[in-house]
Image: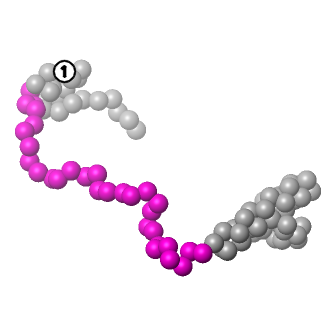
Amino acid sequence: MLSRSEVEHVAALARLELSEEEKELFARQLGKIIEYVNTLQELPTDDVPPLVHVVPLKNVWREDKVEEHLEVEKVLSRAPDREERFFRVSRVV
């Protein structure tokens, strides 16, 4: 369990005002978290290779290449409002 002064110090660094009940609560909770982390540090991880991410990731980008596109007039024919070859939309800002 963390001491009350340690909780007060952390709260001061975070610019938090804590009630007496919150200080007691956080002292118990933070103490349990630190205890759990200490338990994890006891695990034998010497043979475990470091990971960048726990889930394997792969690039989801497609290859950048020129492909067939829709005809401009066909696309603009469905636009509610247009100006020459562009969509006309409401002003946002």
* Front residue of this view, candidates 90 and 54: 54
Q: Quadrant of residue 87?
A: top left
Is 51 a magenta residue?
yes
Q: Which residue is mark 1?
A: 78
Is residue 21 at least partly visible in the picture?
yes
The segment highlighted magenta reads 44-73
Location of residue 23 by image quarter: bottom right
Residue 61 drawn at (x, y percent): 25, 52
* Horizontal relation, residue 57 to residue 35: left or right: left
Looking at the image, residue 83 lies above or below residue 9 = above
Picture quadrant of residue 14? bottom right
Q: Is residue 57 magenta?
A: yes
Residue depicted at x 74% and y 67%: 34
Q: Main secondary structure of the magenta part?
A: loop
Looking at the image, the residue that sits furthest to the right is: 20
Look at 84% across and 62% down and name the residue there: 27
Q: Is residue 39 above or below residue 69?
A: below
For the N terminus, the image quarter is bottom right
Residue sitting at 47 percent across and 73 percent down?
50
